[in-house]
Image (cartoon, helix red, strand yellow):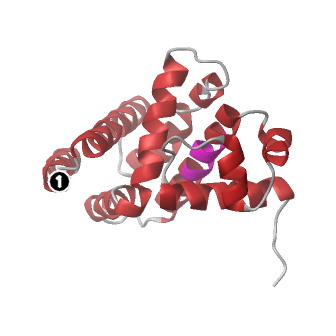
Amino acid sequence: MVEQGSPRDRLLAAVVAHLGEHGLGDLSLRRLADAVGTSHRMLLYHFGSMEGLLVAVVRAVEAKQRALLASLPVDDPAEAARAFWRVLTDPALRAHERLFFELYGQAAQGRPGTTALLDGIVSDWIEPVAAVERARGHPPDVAAARARLGLAVARGLLLDLVATDDVAGVDAAMEEFIALMTR
């Protein structure tokens, strides 16, 4: 089988898979390169730095999540929201969620190499969710506000999950939020 995509895309996919399975921990660029079958120089060539690589990982994971969100049927918004929440809270994604919040905090503090993460970190999510809200009959300004609220609640509950591992608690809170939003 021939691998598809550019060398950068293939490296990124390998790193995403590796971090999803093993987490970040105290991983160095050299150890990460060894784990995915390349050299640290190739990772630097394609991503510029460890931080640049990690930003690319977060962007790739979020792009997959947005694509999944776009594929969900909107005829039953509550069930679509539940299905999406199940994907976001899949234990296999926990390492990616931890990485997201670690980098998000570093970027918000202005740590060099991570601030690029902030570009689109909210706005890339607003339009896909607002489109669903407009389809439900909400005017554009209300749809955008509801999309931002949904993003904030989901991220807040994911941070809660990463910090506490209280799956039942965050699921109950999300269920209550879904009920409020779909009335």
* Residue at 71% over, 45% down: 30
> Residue 133 at x, y = what percent?
38, 46
* Residue that mark 1 sits on: 175
Q: Main secondary structure of the magenta part?
A: helix
> Residue 66 at x, y = what percent?
53, 52
Q: Looking at the image, can residue 104 be seen?
A: yes
Locate residue 143 relative to residue 71 in the image: left or right.
Answer: left
Which residue occupies the extreme top position in the image?
110
**Front in this rendered view, residue 12 or 49:** 49
> Residue 138 at x, y = what percent?
35, 41
**Front in this rendered view, residue 44 or 39:** 39
* Residue at 50% over, 19% down: 108
Q: Callout 1, which amino acid?
A: Glu
Query: Is residue 85 covered in magenta?
Result: no
Magenta stretch: give its range: 56-61
Query: Which element type, helix, strand or loop, lies under badge 1?
Result: helix
> Residue 87 at x, y = what percent?
38, 62
* Residue at 30% over, 36% down: 156
Q: How many marks?
A: 1
